[in-house]
Image (tube, rainbow, N blue to C red):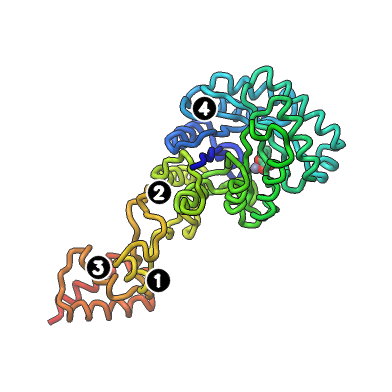
Amino acid sequence: MAHVKIFDTTLRDGEQSPGVNLNRPEKLEIAKQLERLGVDVMEAGFPASSQGDFESVREIANTIRNVSVTGLARAVKSDIDTAWEALKGGADPRLHVFIATSPIHMEYKLKKTPDEVVAKAVEMVKYAKQRFSKIEWSAEDASRSDLKFLARIIEEVIDAGATVINLPDTVGYTTPYEYGKMFEYIKQNVPNIEKVDLSAHCHDDLGMAVANSIAAVENGATQVEGTINGIGERAGNAALEELAVALKIRQDFYPYETNLVLKEIKRSSDLISKLTGMQVPRNKAVVGQNAFAHESGIHQDGVLKHAQTYEIITPEMVGVKSNSLVMGKHSGKHAFKDKLKQLGYELSEEKIFEAFTEFKKLTDSKKEVTDDDLFTILTEIQTMT
Ligand code: KIV
Ligand code: ZN
């Protein structure tokens, strides 16, 4: 089984979610939970972006001992120096340095020719190598870059000392087939590519971040980047909990494993939602409130007979206590009887029928019937002669 490293960027790209601002103690609390979750690398922030971020990254690097802590830097000497100051006390420090490689970014944002971009990338990796032994180099907007140019710059930064090559889909533009093909091309056209980790970093603008990441893994990526709950710039990043569970559940098809402790997923999701203020949508895969809830009578009946009829993930696997059968207008008699049992009622078939009829009437005016509603119905039924 091939191992896929998990690079968590909840504290850097995740914090770039509009409206999110984490303070130092909050960042440290998240970092400790990410350590329990078992990520391989955590990007603690962008040290040169603010004094607060610098201090947070330094504190996390000095505290977390079982995960490699990294920080982001532009291809600028002062960013690299600041990152070193923040990360040098870490157990396994690494730098994450990036420069854009797409025509639109090089021309309008960087105002540099492709040759100048190659020279700058190489110069900065060599500069960083004087301090960092581990350097991740990212080709920002890789998915909109010219493949031949990408192969050329990657070859040069590997020669300069980069140990991880990251190919971000910065604007969430690519599709699984296309993104996979990019990894295949780089694997086939860059000498020494086997000597470094190849990383995927996907944004979710077209809703394909997780699918694109899996396509990258199928085509040689050895590391995947993302965030918990998929938070991040604009539509967010690849949701790591979805990715890790998908790889686990579909091991029959994808022979890959990660180090994530899946049981820590729900706790991580809840903590990050609480501290960022970003609510998890009810229907979100893996961690949404509805992910293990069943409402229709047919589904409830199936789940009561054998959970796997309608559940491909067990709630326990991701740290959720149990599934739930929601009592609503689609619920059937089987689930209703089961609910009465749970509430401690042993009724005759006749009384159950009466209670079920009252329950069904109530569902016409209420979306979800609560335990209190059921107690009221049952009290009335029992007092009726
Ligand atoms: O999406 C992106 O391109 C990034 C880089 C800084 C790696 O987040
Ligand atoms: Zn990003």
**Vertical comparison of 155 with 299: above or below:** above
* 111 horizontally vs 328: left or right: right
Who is closer to the viewer here, 307 or 100?
307
Residue positioned 66% across, 23% down in the render: 82
Location of residue 287 in the rendering, given as x and y in whole percent from the top left corner: 45, 52
Q: Which residue is mark 1?
A: 367
How far apart are the alpha carbons under marks 1 and 2? 28 Å
Please name the amino acid that badge 2 sits on.
Answer: Val
**Vertical comparison of 91 with 215: above or below:** above
* SS for dot 2: helix
* 162 horizontally vs 276: left or right: right
Give the number of the mark in front: 1 or 3: 3
Give the number of the mark in front: 1 or 2: 2
The quadrant in which residue 123 appears is: top right
Q: Which residue is mark 3?
A: 338
Who is closer to the viewer here, 91 or 252?
252
Quadrant of the frame with the C terminus = bottom left
How far apart are the alpha carbons under marks 2 and 3? 25 Å
Please name the amino acid that badge 3 sits on.
Answer: Asp
Q: Which residue is mark 4?
A: 60
